[in-house]
Amino acid sequence: MGGVTSGRSPALPRPRDERATWGCVGAAVRLTLRYREGVSRMTGTLLTPGDEIDVVVTSTKPFGLFVESDAGLSGLVRGGSAAVGATLRVRVVEFDADESRFSAMLLG
């Protein structure tokens, strides 16, 4: 299979959403998804308790920090203090896949 092909093929499963496309380069398959406006979470991104990740502070509150991971998942770090825009290293305490959010604690 030389070059790049794209579109729909009986050899590949059809995406459930018409906004999804696929393309092949040799044996590799590339899937591109376009999300509706207002839908920005990746449901395939899973975190597990104990994972250590870098996050960016998006908001500060008296009870903690709202943060966002590189994958775009929102989280809460209770009791921490940092400036908006700061990058922090945290350990995931809990991950809610249905809501695509997590809670974490500061490392260090």
Image (tube, helix red, strand yellow):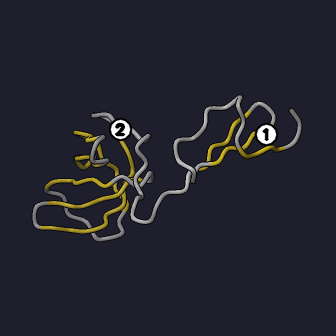
Q: Amino acid at mark 1?
A: Val
Q: Residue furthest bottom?
A: 84
- Nearest the viewer among 8 and 81 is 8
Q: Quadrant of residue 91?
A: top left
Question: Sequence-wise, which precedes: disc 1 or disc 2?
Answer: 1
Name the residue at 31% across, 47% down. Answer: 100
Q: Amino acid at mark 2?
A: Leu
Identify the element where label 1 is drawn. strand
**Above or below, 66 relative to 17:** below
Looking at the image, is mark 1 or mark 2 nearer the viewer? 1
Q: Mark 2, residues whose alpha carbon is within 10 Å: few (<14), some, or many (≥20)?
A: some
Question: To which quarter of the image does residue 95 belong?
Answer: top left
Label placed on residue 35: none
Looking at the image, which residue is at 44% across and 40% down? Answer: 44
State the image coordinates of residue 18 (x, y, percent, origin top left).
Answer: 57, 50
The local secondary structure at tag 2 comes to loop
**Where is 76 relative to 6, above or below?**
below
Residue at image point 89% right, 37% down: 2
Q: Position of residue 21 (x, y in %)?
A: 64, 48
Asked if the residue under mark 2 is in contact with the one under mark 1, i.e. CB atoms within 8 Å, the reply is no
* Horizontal and vertical percent position of residue 84: 30, 71
On screen, residue 90 versus residue 6, left or right, reads left
Look at mark 2 in the image and give the residue it sits on.
47
Q: On residue 25, which mark appears? A: 1
- Residue 108 visible in rendering: no
Residue extending farthest to the right is: 2
How many residues crowd around disc 1 within 10 Å: few (fewer than 14), some, or many (20 or more)?
few
Residue 62 relative to residue 30: left or right: left
